[in-house]
Amino acid sequence: MKAYFAAGCFWGIEKKFSLLSGVLNTAVGYMGGASSNPTYKEVCSGETGHAEAVEVEFDPELLRYEELLKRFWQMHSPTSLNYQGGDIGTQYRSAIFYVDEEQRNVAEQSLKEEAASGRHADPIVTEITPAGTFWRAEVYHQQYLDKQNRGSCSN
């Protein structure tokens, strides 16, 4: 089964999702924009409408979608509109891209629970939107932090 998330720089969230037991594969790419087959340079311009996104392939017998959502809320600031840390622009927005109605319902319930949790002083701005085409990023972006022998984007 697949799930798609955007939460800032895709390198860091790909790494965090890849470490979860039950995740079979991860890939970074672009989703939610208007152009076909965008490049990193085009997405970084902010003009394509795409978000830097992560495709998470997981085994639902080992890892529930609800757990992926729980981790998603923990790995970024869902109250930051179009930025995470030093990354600024719509391509760094917080988004959940659902593949079917079940994922949509679970994501919307998860957002309600997260908003009611008291963990955030500001409103959550995470988009919940249908998954469109996932445009896989260039090869050098895949598992980038592992290739650079870095544990996160900030070290």
Image (cartoon, grey):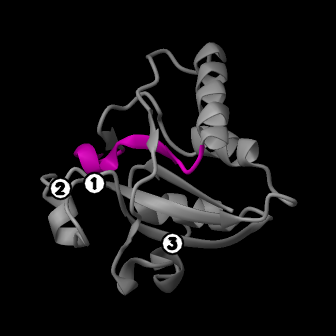
Residue under pointer 2: 48
Question: Distance from label 2 to label 3 (Cα)?
Answer: 20 Å
Q: Which residues are magenta?
A: 85-100
For the question of whether residue 155 can be seen, the reply is no
Please state which of residues 61 and 6 is positioned toward the viewer in this rendering. 61
Q: Is residue 13 magenta?
A: no
The tag on residue 100 is: none
Q: What type is the residue that disc 1 sits on?
A: His
Q: Can residue 35 be seen from the camera position used here?
A: yes
Residue picked out by circle 1: 50
Please tell me how crowded label 3 is: few (under 14), some (14-19), or many (20+) other residues with Cα within 10 Å: many
Quadrant where the image shows the N terminus: bottom right
Residue furthest to the front in view is 101
Q: Quadrant of residue 18?
A: bottom right
Relative to residue 148, is residue 155 depicted above or below?
A: above
Q: Say which label, 2 or 3, has the lower sequence index.
A: 3
Q: Spatial distance from mark 1 to mark 2, Cα to Cα?
A: 5 Å
Q: Look at the numbered discs 1 and 2 and tell me whether their residues touch, using CB distance below 8 Å.
A: yes
- Left or right side of 102 for 52: left
Residue at the spot 36% in from the left edge and 44% down from the top edge: 85
Name the side, left or right, on which 83 lies relative to 75: left
Q: Label 1 vs label 3: CA separation?
A: 15 Å
Is 46 situated above or below 54? Answer: above
Q: Residue at position x 29%, y 48% from top?
A: 86
State left or right for residue 46 relative to residue 15: left
Q: Which residue is mark 3?
A: 27
Residue 93, compared with residue 44, is above or below; it is above
> Is the Cβ of the residue at disc 2 closer than 8 Å to that at disc 3?
no
Query: Toward the viewer: 54 or 129?
Result: 129
Residue density around tag 1, few if under 14, some if 14–19, many if 20 or more, within 10 Å: many
Q: Position of residue 90 (x, y in %)?
A: 25, 44
Q: Amino acid at mark 3?
A: Ala
